[in-house]
């Protein structure tokens, strides 16, 4: 991960850039102030207890003094005991999970569970940057308007205002935590412009912004005495208790791959920050660890899931051959923002014929336009050309893209880049309040796994990292309040779940299952959909589900699994949520384009919300203990 961060490139400079100060003018005071009351749905909760106080959570601070420090956070060792109790459990080590962990670690013990290495998250691969109003030539009103327009006005207005108003303070805090951003010679931030934005407002680090942010947050987390990083640990399911007729999350069941053992982690508050579910499609910009685990676990536990039909396909993933699959390399939106134009294989520029904003139209418009060119012309990809721009500026601002393309024999200062749309982001997810609360008490969600209402029917470029920053901060107070009044002792007991290593035959079978799911989704729930195709996908996925249930002639449930089957089941759960949500929406809006309902309808301007309980209810504390 450190090597990736070093390859991110030097801070750049652009003479025509909009300039924004990083410090001065009371920026720190703004960063620590409460959000304006106008952006809250309800009266804001009281402030958290003082850091290092003698309250219930303050007593758990261990060796760390106020502000962290003390022993170094551990990431190399597996869980020492066969069970673990903590104050806060965090799934995911991207921008949302780590920022939340750093905030709540000032008040109690935190365990961060990460599926692979701690640095392996979607944040690590983000290129563009963080959108925020950091220039006097820009305004919150403009950012709000751009976000609403990109989201086809399905956004939650309060969420949009909260993120746009609070975003600048969160970005400045990120810089103070050590995140490196590209600057002008006078030290001000270089702000880029991307598709759908009316002003330059993207704070970035060349074309490897995510790697720079991840490195800074991970370094802080490793150094914090109250944070424990547990790598190569896979979430299996959430554990809940029934209280007064409602579910309360009390931790999770996980599989510690390093120790080869399933464990129970009991927690007073649990945060899902697991990212999206990119590998439900054959081509995605998401790393291999992103298989919809957070959404699937929350759905099985009974949480509300919203707007899963809105799947964003980034218009420009690097085309590397007809047989390529898996993680695609992203060609950043910023390339088009810097003057790149889209051409078909006949050398014709086509975007002005589709939208007056041409290459700077929102992603859904650009992706559909490219898809239409590919389908009508029978071509496997299109071309993105920035070779007409000054060579030095191109290499300065896009060193990572230039290096990757050159390794494939493409000099982007001379040659056009072959690109095609690839799955990139889920605008739907676990439904939350403005404070990151889900429909299950004690369970919170932020980042791509969550549906906060910010994105509506389509995400505006570079609003995703911003959302993670704002909502991880907003979730802190309710998490502390819940943890403060949780039982004084959360009990973790050993859970006898059999999770074993898959045989070669099982790996082959499960690989085929995954490819079948991906094929169904790309064919029927991709960029352009029909009712008949969605219904066919629904039936096909039921067949896949039945095959998994009766795999090898026996039913396999949560308690006897191989990890690859867990992932396949999670992908299947997400795929079914996407199809069911898409079938319910009788219109085309944003990322959901249905040929049978080609126009937006006022009657359909509402969220699609799904929720269910597993047969017999979610996994409860009593059920978990019964497996001991």
Image: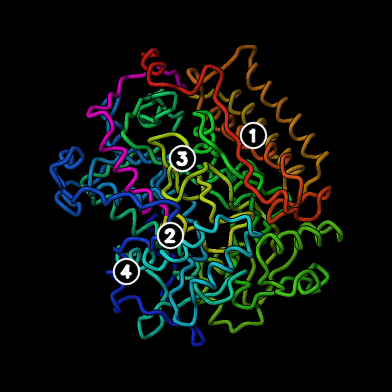
SS at badge 4: helix
Write down the residue under mark 4. 30
Q: Which residues lie in the magenta part?
A: 471-500
Write down the residue under mark 2. 211
Q: Nearer the viewer, residue 100 or 367?
A: 100
Write down the residue under mark 3. 438
Q: Earlier in the sequence, mark 1 or mark 4?
A: 4
Mark 2 near mark 1, Cβ–Cβ under 8 Å?
Answer: no
- Horizontal side, residue 602 vs residue 79: left or right: right
Q: Earlier in the sequence, mark 3 or mark 2?
A: 2
Q: Residue at x 39, y 26 (%)?
A: 260
Q: Estimate the spatial distance between the alpha carbons at disc 3 and disc 2, rounded to whole Å.
A: 29 Å
Residue 239 visible within the image: yes
**Mark 1: few, some, or many residues within 10 Å (few <14, many ≥20)?**
many
Mark 3 near mark 2, Cβ–Cβ under 8 Å?
Answer: no
Q: Residue at x 21, y 48 (%)?
A: 49
Q: Earlier in the sequence, mark 3 or mark 1?
A: 3
Q: Quadrant of residue 22?
A: bottom left
Residue 568 x %, y %: 59, 31
Q: Residue at x 62, y 77 (%)?
A: 413
Write down the residue under mark 1. 514
Residue 524 x %, y %: 76, 42
């Amino acid at each position: 991960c450190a090597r990736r961060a070093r390859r991110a490139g030097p801070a750049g400079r652009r003479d025509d850039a909009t300039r924004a100060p990083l410090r001065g003018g009371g920026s720190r005071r703004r960063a620590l102030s409460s959000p304006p009351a106008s952006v809250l749905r309800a009266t804001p909760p009281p402030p958290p207890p003082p850091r290092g106080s003698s309250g219930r959570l303050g007593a758990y601070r261990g060796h760390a003094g106020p502000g962290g420090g003390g022993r170094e956070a551990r990431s190399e060792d597996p869980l020492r005991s066969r069970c673990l109790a903590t104050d806060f459990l965090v799934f995911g080590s991207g921008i949302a999970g780590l920022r939340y962990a750093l905030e709540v670690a000032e008040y109690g013990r935190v365990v961060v569970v990460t599926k692979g290495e701690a640095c392996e998250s979607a944040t690590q691969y983000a290129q563009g940057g963080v959108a925020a109003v950091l220039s006097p030539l820009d305004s919150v009103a403009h950012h709000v308007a751009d976000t609403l327009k990109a989201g086809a006005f399905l956004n939650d207005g309060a969420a949009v205002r909260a993120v746009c108003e609070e975003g600048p303070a969160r970005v400045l805090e990120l810089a103070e935590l050590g995140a490196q951003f590209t600057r002008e010679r006078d030290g001000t931030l270089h702000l880029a412009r991307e598709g759908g934005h009316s002003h330059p407002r993207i704070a970035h680090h060349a074309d490897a912004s995510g790697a720079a942010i991840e490195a800074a947050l991970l370094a802080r987390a490793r150094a914090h005495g109250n944070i424990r990083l547990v790598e190569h640990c896979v979430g299996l399911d959430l554990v809940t208790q029934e209280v007064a007729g409602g579910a309360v999350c009390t931790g999770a069941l996980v599989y510690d791959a390093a120790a080869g053992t399933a464990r129970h982690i009991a927690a007073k508050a649990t945060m899902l920050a697991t990212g999206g579910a990119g590998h439900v499609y054959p081509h995605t910009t998401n790393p291999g660890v992103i298989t919809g685990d957070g959404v699937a676990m929350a759905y099985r536990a009974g949480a509300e899931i919203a707007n899963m039909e809105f799947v964003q396909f980034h218009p420009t993933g690097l085309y590397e051959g007809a047989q390529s699959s898996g993680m695609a390399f992203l060609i950043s939106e910023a390339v088009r923002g810097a003057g790149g134009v889209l051409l078909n294989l006949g050398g014709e520029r086509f975007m002005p014929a589709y939208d007056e904003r041409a290459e700077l139209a929102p992603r859904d418009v650009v992706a559909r336009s490219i898809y239409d060119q590919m389908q009508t012309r029978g071509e496997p990809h299109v071309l993105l050309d920035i070779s007409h721009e000054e060579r030095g500026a191109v290499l300065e601002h896009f060193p990572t893209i230039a290096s990757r393309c050159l390794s494939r024999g493409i000099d982007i200062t001379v040659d056009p880049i072959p690109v095609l749309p690839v799955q990139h982001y889920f605008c739907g997810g676990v439904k939350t309040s403005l404070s990151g609360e889900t429909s299950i008490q004690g369970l919170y969600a932020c980042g791509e796994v969550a549906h906060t209402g910010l994105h509506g029917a389509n995400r505006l470029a570079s609003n995703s990292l911003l959302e993670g920053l704002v909502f991880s901060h907003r979730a802190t107070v309710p998490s502390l309040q819940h943890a403060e009044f949780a039982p004084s002792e959360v009990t973790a007991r050993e859970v006898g779940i059999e999770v074993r290593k898959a045989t070669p035959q099982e790996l082959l079978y499960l690989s085929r299952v995954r490819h079948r799911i991906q094929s169904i989704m790309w064919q029927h729930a991709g960029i352009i959909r029909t009712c008949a195709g969605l219904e066919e996908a629904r039936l096909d996925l039921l067949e896949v589900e039945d095959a998994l249930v009766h795999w090898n002639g026996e039913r396999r449930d949560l308690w006897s699994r191989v990890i690859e089957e867990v992932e396949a089941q999670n992908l299947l759960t997400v795929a079914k949520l996407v199809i069911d949500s898409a079938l319910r929406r009788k219109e085309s809006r944003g990322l959901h384009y249905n040929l049978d309902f080609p126009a937006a309808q006022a009657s359909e301007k509402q969220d699609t919300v799904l929720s269910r309980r597993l047969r017999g209810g979610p996994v409860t504390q009593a059920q978990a203990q019964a497996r001991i």
